[in-house]
Image: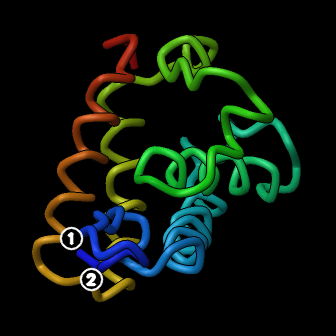
Amino acid sequence: MRSSEHGEAALVSFYEQVGGRATFERLVTEFYRGVADDPVMKPMYPEDDLGPAAERLTQFLEQYWGGPGTYSERRGHPRLRMRHVAFKVNPDARDRWLGHMRAALDTLELSPLHEATLWDYLQRAAHSLVNTFEE
């Protein structure tokens, strides 16, 4: 916590605790580095350039963890399941996504508590987006 100018304790968001935008940009950059070479994941991203997808994910994660609300301002409610329904998200895709995200998260060198908190969320989100069990 930090003190406000009126002497009250103000909560510091998870977003701020882990380093703000720079941390989430590093996470997403490393994540998409893995996706770019993944034969299952890469075709799920329609743009030739992964930049727009990376920016959307960065904005989403920033907003979720207490940073700016840019994602909702530009795209509306996240509606993650709806936004992913067009893609075949089976257990293999989920596990690949998690593998790339785990590798990216490991590059951040967060405190154990912050790392565990973020990883728990990412795992729950990935499992919730599975929409088929077909190969």
**Screen quadrant of the N terminus:** bottom left
Disc 1 marks a residue whose amino acid type is His
**Residue 110 got which mark?**
2
Disc 2 marks a residue whose amino acid type is Leu
Q: Nearer the viewer, residue 33 or 27?
A: 27
Residue 82, picture quadrant: top right
* Residue, disc 1: 114
Q: Position of residue 94 (x, y in %)?
A: 35, 37
**Residue 4 got which mark?**
none
Q: Nearer the viewer, residue 97 or 14?
A: 14
Q: Position of residue 20 (x, y in %)?
A: 51, 74
Q: Position of residue 39 (x, y in %)?
A: 59, 49
Q: Residue at x 60, y 62 (%)?
A: 32
Asked if 30 appears above or below 90 in the picture, the reply is below
**Left or right side of 72 for 132:** left
Q: Residue at x 45, y 24 (%)?
A: 89
Asked if 111 appears above or below 114 in the picture, the reply is below
Q: Position of residue 60 (x, y in %)?
A: 57, 45
Residue 117, picture quadrant: bottom left
**Callout 1 touching callout 2 (CB < 8 Å):** yes
Query: Alpha carbon of mark 1 to alpha carbon of mark 2: how far?
Result: 6 Å
Asked if 100 appears above or below 91 in the picture, the reply is below
Residue 118, picture quadrant: bottom left
